[in-house]
Amino acid sequence: NPIWMARENVNNEQQRGLRGSIYLTLDLLKGLKFTTRGNLNWTHGFDNRFIPGVPAGLGWQGSPLNSVFKTRRETVHTIGDFLLDYDRQFGTDHKLKVLAGYSVEEWQKEELEAER
């Protein structure tokens, strides 16, 4: 009976998160700039579910045992970029432009699930 199942089941799910980005550019010397950028994406969530057993007196198929599910998860994703940019004009005929960079990215994920 779908009405009984909808009324008796409990499903609580929540998810929180934070997402952000920041950057900074510094003029170190004439024509030389240093730029750093950082990105963060963090999520945390959980899910609690309870499915009651079907009482034998109701007359339909199903397990007479209750079921409980719990899940917890957390994810952290970070990116960091580091750039050196050199742009310089020498006289009227010569120009030098160089870009060097380094980037690092990391994912961390943890999940725990239990069922009875």
Image: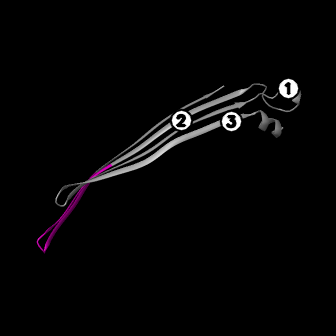
Nearer-the-camera pick, 28 or 8: 28
Magenta highlight range: 81-101
Q: Is residue 100 shown left or right of residue 64?
A: left
What residue do we see at 82% from left, 39% from top?
Answer: 3
Amino acid at pointer 3: Asn
What residue does disc 3 label?
A: 11
What residue does disc 2 label?
A: 73
What residue does disc 1 label?
A: 56
Residue 67 is situated, as x and y percent measured from the top left of the image, at 70, 28
Nearer-the-camera pick, 72 or 27: 27
Amino acid at pointer 2: Arg
Mark 3 or mark 1, whichever is nearer to me: 3
What residue do we see at 37% from left, 50% from top?
Answer: 22
The residue carrying pointer 2 sits among few (fewer than 14), some (14 to 19) or many (20 or more) residues within 10 Å by Cα, namely: some
What residue do we see at 83% from left, 32% from top?
Answer: 61
Q: Is residue 113 shown left or right of residue 41?
A: right
Q: Earlier in the sequence, mark 3 or mark 1?
A: 3
- SS under mark 3: strand
Q: Earlier in the sequence, mark 1 or mark 2?
A: 1
